[in-house]
């Protein structure tokens, strides 16, 4: 039996060359990549085609991260989550602000507040942001792409 066959099931994958190749295959030439494998995250900053990027950034970020997850699965390793032009960072802040504002409204009106449909990652951000809030509780409702969070006053 070879040494490779005796190795553990999970391996550390060198993400930087792969991400660089993906970005270049997408047609971008002016960019910077920061990969932090130990933190399982990375960032790409693209400095060209800003109009096209702004218009398509949510779909690009989702698609690239989906591909990274599939590659990690194939290599039986841990995936990284890639942010492009701070989209995820800005989105996380926006969702946190939305959750806190909705909680404030739920408390003041004493009524449940339903947030717009969100993906599982964004719903988790809402649940985590309000988990320690003493005056509200959260729950998810709906199915599939129409799943959303309800913030209820306690």
Image: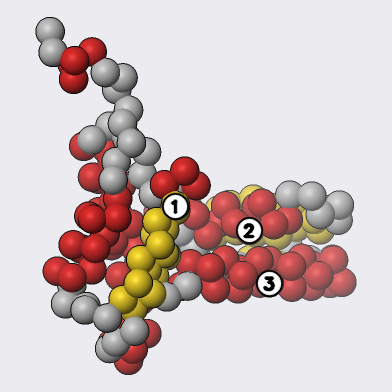
Disc with the residue nearer the chain's start (3 vs 2): 3
Cα separation between marks 1 and 3: 27 Å
Q: Residue at x 21, y 79 (%)?
A: 29
- Closest to the observer, 37 or 101: 37
For label 2, the residue is 126
- Residue 101 versus residue 140 in the image, above or below: below
Q: Residue at x 66, y 72 (%)?
A: 98
Say which element carries label 2: helix
- Closest to the observer, 51 or 36: 36
Disc with the residue nearer the chain's start (1 vs 3): 1
Cα separation between marks 1 and 2: 25 Å
* Relative horizontal placement of residue 108, taking residue 76 as reference (left or right): right
Circle 3 residues within 10 Å: few <14, some 14–19, many ≥20 = some
Circle 2 residues within 10 Å: few <14, some 14–19, many ≥20 = many
Asked whether residue 6 appears in the rendered view, the answer is yes
For label 3, the residue is 97
Say which element carries label 1: strand
For label 1, the residue is 36
Residue 149 on image: x %, y %: 60, 58
Residue 87 on image: x %, y %: 46, 73
* Relative horizontal placement of residue 111, taking residue 121 as reference (left or right): right
Disc with the residue nearer the chain's start (1 vs 2): 1
In what quadrant of the picture does the N terminus appear?
A: top left
Which residue occupies the extreme bottom position in the image?
51
Of marks 1 and 2, the one in the foreground: 1
- Which quarter of the figure has residue 28? bottom left
Say which element carries label 3: helix
- Residue 131 versus residue 64 in the image, above or below: above
């Amino acid at each position: 039996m070879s040494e490779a066959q005796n190795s553990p099931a999970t391996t550390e994958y060198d993400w930087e060359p792969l991400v660089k190749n993906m970005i270049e295959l997408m047609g971008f030439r002016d960019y910077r990549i920061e990969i932090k494998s130990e933190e399982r995250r990375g960032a790409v900053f693209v400095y060209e085609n800003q109009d096209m990027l702004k218009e398509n950034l949510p779909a690009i970020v989702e698609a690239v991260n989906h591909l990274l997850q599939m590659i990690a699965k194939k290599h039986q390793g841990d995936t990284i989550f890639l942010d492009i032009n701070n989209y995820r960072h800005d989105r996380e802040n926006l969702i946190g602000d939305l959750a806190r504002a909705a909680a404030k409204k739920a408390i003041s009106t004493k009524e449940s507040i339903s947030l717009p449909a969100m993906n599982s990652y964004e719903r988790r951000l809402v649940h985590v942001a309000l988990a320690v809030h003493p005056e509200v509780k959260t729950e998810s409702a709906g199915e599939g792409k129409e799943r959303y969070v309800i913030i209820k006053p306690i």
